Image (cartoon, rainbow, N blue to C red):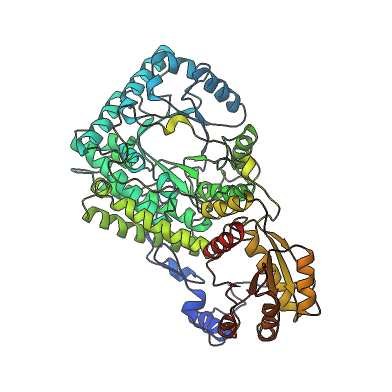
Amino acid sequence: MEEKLNMLADFPKISTKEWKDKIVTDLKGADYEKKLVWRTPEGFNVQPFYRQEDLKGLKTTVSAPGQFPYVRGTKENNEWAIRQNICACENARKANKKALEVLNKGITSLGFCLDADKLNYHFIKVLLNGIDARAIAINFNICPCKAPELANILVRYYGRCGYDFKAVYGSINVDPMKQMLLKGKNLSREEVAERLVATVNAAKTLVNYRVVGVNSIILNNSGAYCAQELAYALAWGAEYMTMMTEAGVPNYLAARDIRFNMGIGGNYFMEIAKFRAARLLWAKIVEAYKAPIFTTALKNAAKMNVSATTSRFNMTVFDAYVNLLRSQTETMSAALAGVDEIVVTPFDVTYEQPTDFAERIARNQQLLLKEEAHFDKVVDPAAGSYYLENLTASIAAEAWKQFLAIQEEGGLFEMIKAGKVQDAVAANLKTRLADVAKRKEVLLGSNQFPNFNEKAAKKIKANQCCAGKACCNAPAANEIKTLPVARAAEEFETLRLETEGAKKQPVAFMLTIGNLAMRIARAQFSCNFLACAGYKVIDNNGFKSVKDGIKAARRAKADIIVLCSSDDEYATFAPQAWLDLQDAKEMFIVAGAPACMEDLQKLGIQNFIHVRCNVLDTLKSFNQQLLNK
């Protein structure tokens, strides 16, 4: 009879110490902390492994889905709305036609961007014609000073349609502090509060409309890391809660009217943990407004409502189809984290007004997760994961620490007025761009493994929705500091477009010689390195002598000759090549950082490319030499 194993009883229990001792032994003297413990950009450490004992004391494991403090979700299912945004700034009829088309293609939430100057009852009537507001979420972005008027128009329109006001749902994204950050508009605290309260009062009848927006997506698109975005988002929401309650808005109504429009970054597990931590911390913040009691209405209003949008920060112009891979993993993070709504940014948004094809793919990215991967069937799949529970707790702790620091500075509004938020995000952006330049942060297709033959200049078109216009009552912009807005790949793209626009595309020739393994590895490294600037690269199998390699390079009309060999052989091969090339027109590069580098530099060899290089700065210097001839 076949003997059956009992996995729990027939194998000995192994302690955490035993596991760690075994790992230390296998490291063969390497430092455990430096080799395996990840120091995250968020400011905390992540261990190489977690066990059940690491869950002890974590508050993230004590609640159920739909129960306060909502770390496991605000719902008892994992359904989310699939949203598509439509620019309605110019033509209501055209926007309406497009909305009706996408509603038949899986969309369950519409977002309309409105021009404040065109707002009137007739415009909204045309825009929403044929759209049943009881069956679909309808969201609006408009200048905050026009938001109360929009709310009044919606109440009037929905009333004339005969709708039960409790049956219609959506949002009006009133966010004056977003204006301050993006436009540099210098609003007073009283002006901000007035716009919030006026809109909340105008929309009281629309009980399922969230009219106050916290748009931390703009921080995400400026390069903010998870914990930084979360801390500012929480302080943002708390600021608006305080402003509204001080103006007499009931605490439950103030909390119920806030929607968080957050970004989704590319760090898969970190983003899952971010949204879980966000719900936990926001519930605790709302609880602080409970005086004199924590009512059922306030407890329900403490459910964080999150609309998540895939990031533009890591999207690229070159090799743009890779944007689909980035946005897909981001969408997965948000879906598994249990957000309420997801917007997938079309893959071509970096270089043109998104095409119908790109928008279709963006919709299908979510439909695949629902209809084929069944992500909507399981509530909080991260629950109980030793790694994700600890990650959630760590992000919550770091974000809370930053949140308290913001409060000590007088709150987010005062920090924005003083430019401290803008400076903090700019400093973070500078760090991230430096990491991209050095390939510490990899952007596939841009700073690593580029498509060697791609040209992009001709596909770049103007891409600007008229929502970018200033507020209808806005004075001159930049009265206060504005938030930096950039994409991680922009500097590499500028460099490559510069090469593309040159009279002649530089040709880089790999002079491969000596040790087979090393010359192949260094030629591959060099091809990828130089192709990031848009150079044409020519690889080779190997040459018997340096002179043969140089002759072949000149036959290929090379502008750059890259010597690819082993460190030991460079001491011989590099001086031979330099002797033939030092008075020639070709640029000479040694692939690597050999021990003899200092001796080679004394001979006059100055160009070395290796893993410790600042790739961007090195390529900029090459471009200056090659394109300005």
- Judge by depth and name the residue closer to the eye, 580 or 253: 580
Which quadrant of the structure image shows residue 509? bottom right
Residue drawn at x 18%, y 43% as measured from the top left: 292
Instruction: Give left or right: position of 13 versus 579.
Output: left
**Relative image position of residue 354 (x, y in whole percent):** 58, 35
Is residue 137 at least partly visible in the picture? yes
In the rendered image, the vertical position of residue 597 relative to residue 398, given as above or below: below
Residue 128 showing in the rendered view: no
Query: Where residue 137 sits in the image (x, y, percent)?
Result: 47, 29
Task: Kindly identify the residue that appears in the image at 60 percent across and 37 percent down.
Answer: 363
Name the foreground residue: 243 vs 19: 243
Q: Where in the figure is residue 476, as x and y percent of width and height?
A: 30, 35
For the N terminus, the quadrant is bottom right
Q: Is residue 189 above or below residue 288?
A: above
Where residue 404 sits in the image (x, y, percent)?
26, 56
Q: On the picture, is 38 further left or further right than 607?
A: left
Determine whether, in the image, residue 220 is placed left or right of residue 177: right
